[in-house]
Image (spheres, rainbow, N blue to C red):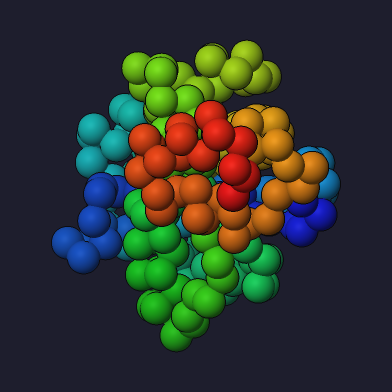
Amino acid sequence: MGKFPVIVFDFETTGLSPGRGDRAIEIGAVLLQDGQIIDRFQSLMNPGIPVSPFIQGLTGISNAMVRRAPRCAEVMTAFADFIGQHPLVAHNATFDARFLDAELARIDRIRTNEMACTLLTARRIYPHISSHKLEALIRYKKLHSEGVFHRAAADAEMTARLWVAMIEDVKKLAGLSELSLEAIQKLCRISKARAQSLFTQEHGL
């Protein structure tokens, strides 16, 4: 595992697109250093808009819960301070990055952090499995789970465990003793076929 710390995070949201008015309703994150969780951040968020019955059923987050929660601006200010300039990791990072950037923009903050995606990484190193959803990957790698999904803190912790496991798998596949964030980003940018070729030929990353 690389020596650099990363923030692994997850949002629960009212929908799929901040561009269509959807908002974050929960953030969960862990600070991972040398494969160990050394700090945590979690909060519900009041977006000022209703949570649909579908999202309530999926996440268990009710309108009553978000009404009692701090406003998004307050939570995101604290979260921006928590992440600092640490690299960020998320499962389906494009989704979470959209909401992170949109919520930060509302408080006049801009993300400059590098980001890596466990979903794209999993597709490169486990092309043979049928699903790359977080739940499926946790089962495939036989990682500890409390059985709770679609809550931000639990998903962030499980994604962190997955990240640690995948880093070790990439190092073995590529014949490396250490692995940088840049190498993971490079892996995610190439095709699945090219990734398998690199691993087969032991060319490294």
Q: Is residue 68 left or right of residue 51?
A: right
Pick the residue in front: 201 or 51: 201
Can the viewer see residue 153 in this picture? no
Q: Is residue 107 above or below residue 36?
A: below
Count the numbered circles shown. Answer: 0
* Residue 113 or residue 154, whichever sits in front: 113
Residue occupying image coordinates x 51% and y 39%: 198
- Does 109 sit above or below residue 82? below
Q: Residue furthest left?
A: 20
Left or right: 67 as drawn, with respect to 202: left
Question: In the displayed structure, does residue 42 sit left or right of residue 99?
Answer: right
Task: Where is residue 8? Give x, y as percent.
Answer: 61, 49
Left/right placement of residue 51 relative to residue 116 reads: left
Looking at this view, is 149 or 48 the one in front?
149
Up/down of 182 relative to 201, above or below: below
Image quadrant where residue 192 sits: top left
The foreground one among 67 and 96 is 96
- Quadrant including the N terminus: top right
Q: In the rendered image, is residue 183 in sight? A: yes
Q: Position of residue 18 (x, y in %)?
A: 26, 62
Residue furthest out toward the front: 201
Residue at position x 60%, y 18% in the image: 141
- Which residue is painted at 44% across and 85% down in the image? 108
Residue appearing at x 45%, y 48% in the figure: 188
The location of residue 135, given as percent across then percent down, is 47, 22
